[in-house]
Amino acid sequence: MHFDVFNGDADGILALHQSRLHTPKPEATLLTGVKRDIALLQKIETVHNSSIDVFDISLDSNRNSLLSLLEHGNTITYTDHHFAGTIPDTDSLTTHLDPSPLVCTSLIVDTLLQGKYRSWAIAGAYGDNLHDSAQKLATTLSLSITQLTELRELGELLNYNGYGADISDLHFAPDALYLAVQPFDDPFSFLAESAELKTLRQGFTEDMVLAMQQPEMTPGKHNRIYSFPNVPWARRVSGVFSNLRAREKKDAAHALIVKNSDGSLRISVRAPLNNKKNADTLCLSFPTGGGRTAAAGINQLPAEMLDTFFERFQETFPR
């Protein structure tokens, strides 16, 4: 058997899509989830003697499951841009890892495939809030301003769909959204023909109207913190809202707090775009934290630790 395991955001979907355009595997079993559902290899720990391709989920967060799968005779290719930690030394594991803050998994795949499906990679970079990287890569293609704007919208809408506490928060399950993209060689055809994107455009617009009405928790301070209620629209829009605020004030760090149903807090952190460092270091210092140096998060912060988070946030990102 073959398994394609991928993050349910734009970067995971479009990294996989580039790979499958190059090497189709129609027999593949898809395994994904909401963006924060990153411990995906746990779901196939008992698999034996299979091939597995992994895209855009942290090796470190999946270490125990990865080691178990390697012991079971599986062959694994791992492509990712998050913190990896120590990489297992075995011929059964091939890795393409780059934690640079200017790189996402779609861009790693683009390099591996020598730019064969570059328009999709550009959309993936936009979805991961790597606008400068996307625009730099776009200079290698003859794209109009309109086309570049469309690729940005594509990436941001696919990314928007990935955020939620569970699949019920999303407009589309990420595997279904990948399957909607799968038949298209050209992203502009997908943009023109996709019914899914029409739904995402409408949902995005409605959710952002509500998000932009939420006040800043720390008005007047250099870094900005926002808090959203425990409702589906807030969970869906948290990523794109955080990215938007980060682009507005590139020398400031940003945090968004969304309440979970169990009383804990889901936190998204964006390092300053002008100094993409230490978001992962901050979040990894708390239970259920993880991510990458430019953007990271905490899935379930105990409410009693919020003041500690505020203190470390300001210490991590001094003006």
Image: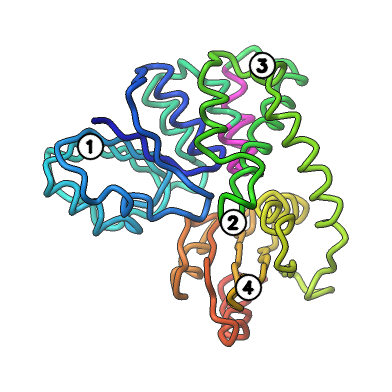
The disc, 3 or 1, on the residue closer to the chain's N-terminal end is 1
Amino acid type at image mark 1:
Thr
* Label of residue 318 in the image: 4
Q: Is residue 313 above or below residue 279?
A: below
Q: Position of residue 125 (x, y in %)?
A: 57, 36
Relative to 88, is 14 on the left or the right? right
The disc, 3 or 4, on the residue closer to the chain's N-terminal end is 3
Q: Which residue is mark 2?
A: 275
Q: Nearer the viewer, mark 3 or mark 4?
A: 3
Q: Under tag 3, what secondary structure?
A: helix
Q: Position of residue 213 (x, y in %)?
A: 88, 60
Q: Nearer the viewer, mark 1 or mark 2?
A: 1
Distance in Å between CA atoms under marks 3 and 4: 42 Å
Q: Under tag 1, what secondary structure?
A: strand
Quadrant where the N terminus is found in the figure: top left
Q: Is residue 299 above or below residue 202?
A: below
Distance in Å between CA atoms under marks 2 and 3: 33 Å
Q: Is residue 268 above or below residue 128?
A: below
Magenta-colored span: 124-140
